[in-house]
Image: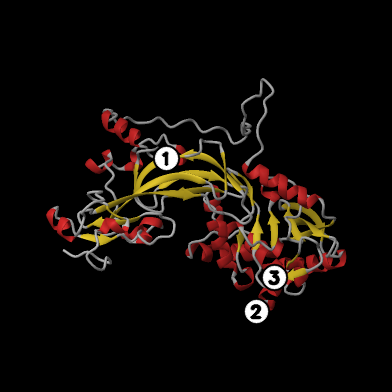
């Protein structure tokens, strides 16, 4: 056996060193090490500046269990805090790598935080509906490192998850063949809990009987309005999450003088083009709505008016012209109004924009939008017409300088070039611009070019680069 890093015959603990296994401070020399069969080596923590005493560790210590804190990081641009909305684990639970631990609601999105490593949950520090600041300690996880001598990086920094063995989770579904898709889920967002599996296995199989088909209501029967729970007494509710973000953003927007501009677009030609391309889009695995055309037309019009894709600094003394066209689309999600954006619209085709829009809508509906989806927007469109209405007064999203709101498409009578009354499909658009840096003439010219691209889709193709 050899004593590493000790030089000479001095006792290890005469130099202030400790044997981790026997914890002896006297006569723990090379000879004593041979007696109790310890191969003494220098601990990687011995020279760490944050540890006062120096330690020795023996090769008989095969496992090192370290409790690691999970710190809440900045999940979205400018995030300062998050509300814990649900815990999926409790202290004592064994979790694997990338297992959902908790769900938090930031000022822009809802996010599920997953375990960065396998281990045991030792403690949680926030209750549901409590607010945690960025940098706060959310929970502790105990990690076991299978190594004769853990390195300093292992013990002080979270090791890569791939280097740690995954624990075996003993669940009823792993002991018998159960199709989790057939198990009634009682957890949030359709999660199947362990109790659900136990209940499912203990219940007798239901007898198969023919289910009578409910009568089809007549087509003229009006849809029943959705009813919310009646408020029978006054109550006070804290403004948090998405609403709190709206307070901050709208307060800042209210300080900006805006210029409004409205117009109507003839959609007749675009309706024909979309019908011709729908089957092709479907064959490519995406759904083609009108929004990709609106976004692409706006991007091409902004190539002629780049000031509309700029942002001023906080003092409004400088303008930054953005090279990337990161266009946001307002979405009504279960967590509130969110505006994720499609990156680099100027470089994408109509089908590529449609595919990315479909992805954002899917993850938005599931509350799974990520930081990259929400940050870096340069311009926004709101399709308020999907709910109803024609004209609107959209509010800017600082530091963006332009936002548009689209009304519902409707069939109305119009005169053709021969003064005959014809059926026309019309879409209304409302623009709001930062009047500190954008003049009304620029907005009007931009809107006219955008309108031209949509009313004559062939010009959209002709000007593509």
State which quadrant residue 344 falls in: bottom right
The reply to whether dot 3 and dot 2 touch (C-beta < 8 Å) is: no
Give x and y (percent) for residue 317. Answer: 82, 66
Q: Earlier in the sequence, mark 3 or mark 1?
A: 1
Q: Which mark is residue 123?
A: 1
**Residue 421 in sight:** no
Near mark 1 (Cα within 10 A), the count class, few <14, some 14-19 or many ≥20, is: some
Quadrant (top left, top right, bottom left, bottom right) of the C terminus: bottom right
* Distance CA(mark 3)–CA(mark 2): 18 Å
Q: Which sits in the foreground, 38 or 231?
A: 38
Task: Name the secondary structure under disc 3.
Answer: loop
Left or right relative to 265: residue 213: left
Task: Name the secondary structure under disc 2.
Answer: loop
The correct choice, above or below, for 236 with respect to 134 in the image is above
Q: Earlier in the sequence, mark 1 or mark 2?
A: 1
Q: Which residue is mark 3?
A: 322
Q: Which mark is residue 465?
A: 2
């Amino acid at each position: 056996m050899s004593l590493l890093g000790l030089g000479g015959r001095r006792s290890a603990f005469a130099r202030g060193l400790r044997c981790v296994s026997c914890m002896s401070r006297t006569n723990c020399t090379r000879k004593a090490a041979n007696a109790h069969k310890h191969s003494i080596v220098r601990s990687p923590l011995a020279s760490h500046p944050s540890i006062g005493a120096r330690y020795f560790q023996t090769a008989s210590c095969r496992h090192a269990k370290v409790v690691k804190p999970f710190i809440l990081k900045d999940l979205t641009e400018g995030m300062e805090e998050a509300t814990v909305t649900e815990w999926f684990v409790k202290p004592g639970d064994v979790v694997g790598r990338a297992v959902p631990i908790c769900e938090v609601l930031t000022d822009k999105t809802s996010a599920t935080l997953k375990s960065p490593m396998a281990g045991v949950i030792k403690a949680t520090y926030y209750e549901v509906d409590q607010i945690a600041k960025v940098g706060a300690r959310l929970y502790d996880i105990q990690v076991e490192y299978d190594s004769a001598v853990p390195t300093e990086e292992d013990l002080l920094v979270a090791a890569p998850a791939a280097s740690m063995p995954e624990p075996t989770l003993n669940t009823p579904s792993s002991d018998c063949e159960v199709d989790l898709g057939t198990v009634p889920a009682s957890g949030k967002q359709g999660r199947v809990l362990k109790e659900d599996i136990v209940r499912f296995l203990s219940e007798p199989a239901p007898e198969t009987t023919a289910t009578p088909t409910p009568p089809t209501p007549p087509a003229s029967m009006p849809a029943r309005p959705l009813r919310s729970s009646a408020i029978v007494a006054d109550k006070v509710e804290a403004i948090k999450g998405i609403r709190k973000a709206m307070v901050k953003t709208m307060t800042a927007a209210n300080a900006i003088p805006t210029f409004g501009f409205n117009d109507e677009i003839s959609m007749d030609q675009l309706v024909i083009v979309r019908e011709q391309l729908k089957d092709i889009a479907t064959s490519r695995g995406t759904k083609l709505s009108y929004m990709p055309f609106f976004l692409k037309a706006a991007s091409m019009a902004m190539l002629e008016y780049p000031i509309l894709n700029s942002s001023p600094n906080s003092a409004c003394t400088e303008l930054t012209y953005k090279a990337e066209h990161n266009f946001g689309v307002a979405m009504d999600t279960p967590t509130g109004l969110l505006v994720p954006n499609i990156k680099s619209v100027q470089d994408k085709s109509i089908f590529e924009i449609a595919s990315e829009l479909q992805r954002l809508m899917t993850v938005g509906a599931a509350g799974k939008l990520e930081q990259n989806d929400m940050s870096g927007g340069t311009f926004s469109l709101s399709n308020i017409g999907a709910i109803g209405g024609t004209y609107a007064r959209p509010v800017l999203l600082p530091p963006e300088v332009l936002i548009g709101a689209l009304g519902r498409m409707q069939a109305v009578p119009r005169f053709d070039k021969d003064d005959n009354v014809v059926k026309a499909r019309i879409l209304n658009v409302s623009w709001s611009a930062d009047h500190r840096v954008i003049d009304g003439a620029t907005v009007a010219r931009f809107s006219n070019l955008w309108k031209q691209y949509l009313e004559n889709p062939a010009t959209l193709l002709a000007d593509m680069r």
